[in-house]
């Protein structure tokens, strides 16, 4: 049993704690109580750790600030009905990299994302354009996009694109990260499971790791809230 646990732990590059290891074993037909798995992992000193950093894009009022329509109601019973977005910053030496994703509250799937060396408006606009193109045939008519009050989201052109596609804009209250907690949680997990584990030496290495991780996160990484399935598996099974 210890060998199988170790294999799963290293297969997922140390990203799985005892709960996900238990679920992964169950998926393989091996049923054991999570307390036993936790005990064995402690004996082998195998654990998953999470650390967080936060990029602040708020620069005061630059345009229109939308109301907080989401009100921490992160549950969504249908795909593409509630989207979350934000920007996070990575550092490798003196270099920085910015990630801007859209997360679907239905299954925590990353719908689209962009990477850039600078946090320009293009970082956000391209992300939104990609998400709109990918979901043109399946977006909910009552789709809402929630963000913080970062300057990108206050710009008139950003609001106009949302309005053109019938998307309601929602923003967190100033300085209240819990209003976008699900997105913050994704950033914490991503950073823990990329730079804190793989320790990239260059920005190019980091970019490649993020591309690989988001594909892994969407298609392979199981989530307990999704019945032990990955986001794509959950969406496929629920709509199949």
Image (spheres, rainbow, N blue to C red):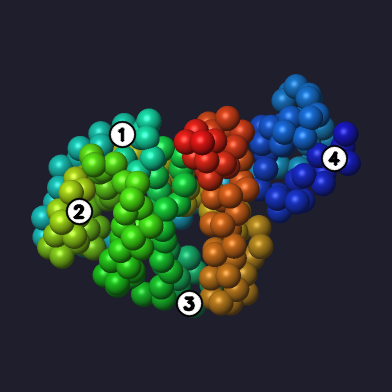
For residue 74, side relative to residue 159 (left or right): right
Question: Element at badge 4?
Answer: helix
Residue 45, placed above or below residue 94 = above
Pointer 3: what residue?
95
Residue 67: x and y in percent read 15, 42
Q: Nearer the viewer, mark 2 or mark 4?
A: 2
Tell me which corner region of the image, top left, top right, bottom left or bottom right, holds residue 124: bottom left
Mark 3 or mark 4: whose residue is earlier in sequence = 4
Q: CA distance from mark 3 to mark 4?
A: 39 Å
Image coordinates of residue 224 in percent, x first then y, are 58, 32
In the rendered view, would you say 25 is above or below 60? above
Q: Residues within 10 Å of mark 1 (few under 14, many from 20)?
A: some
Q: CA distance from mark 1 to mark 2?
A: 23 Å
Query: In the shown orientation, is residue 191 left or right of residue 44?
Result: left
Local SS, label 1: loop
Image quadrant where residue 18 sits = top right
Direction from residue 101 to residue 122 in the image, left or right: left
Between 155 and 195, the residue placed more toward the observer is 155
Q: Earlier in the sequence, mark 2 or mark 4?
A: 4
Residue 180, percent across and down? 34, 43
> What residue does disc 1 label?
72
């Amino acid at each position: 049993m210890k060998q199988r646990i170790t294999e799963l732990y290293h297969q997922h590059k140390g990203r799985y704690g005892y709960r996900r290891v238990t679920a992964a074993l169950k998926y393989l037909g091996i049923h054991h109580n999570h307390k036993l798995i936790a005990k064995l992992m402690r004996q082998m000193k195998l654990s998953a750790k999470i650390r967080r950093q936060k990029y602040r894009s708020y620069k005061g009022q630059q345009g229109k600030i939308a109301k907080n329509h989401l009100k921490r109601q992160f549950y969504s019973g249908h795909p593409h009905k509630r989207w979350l977005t934000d920007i996070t910053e990575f550092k490798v030496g003196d270099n920085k990299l910015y990630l801007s994703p859209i997360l679907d509250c239905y299954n925590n799937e990353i719908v689209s994302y962009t990477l850039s060396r600078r946090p320009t408006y293009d970082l956000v606009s391209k992300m939104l354009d990609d998400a709109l193109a990918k979901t043109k045939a399946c977006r909910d008519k009552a789709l809402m996009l929630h963000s913080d009050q970062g300057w990108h989201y206050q710009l008139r052109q950003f609001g106009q694109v949302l309005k053109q596609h019938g998307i309601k804009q929602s923003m967190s209250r100033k300085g209240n990260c819990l209003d976008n907690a699900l997105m913050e949680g994704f950033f914490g997990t991503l950073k823990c499971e990329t730079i804190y584990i793989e320790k990239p030496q260059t920005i190019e290495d980091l970019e490649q790791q993020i591309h690989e991780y988001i594909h892994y996160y969407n298609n392979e990484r199981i989530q307990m809230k999704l019945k032990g399935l990955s986001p794509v598996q959950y969406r496929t099974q629920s709509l199949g």
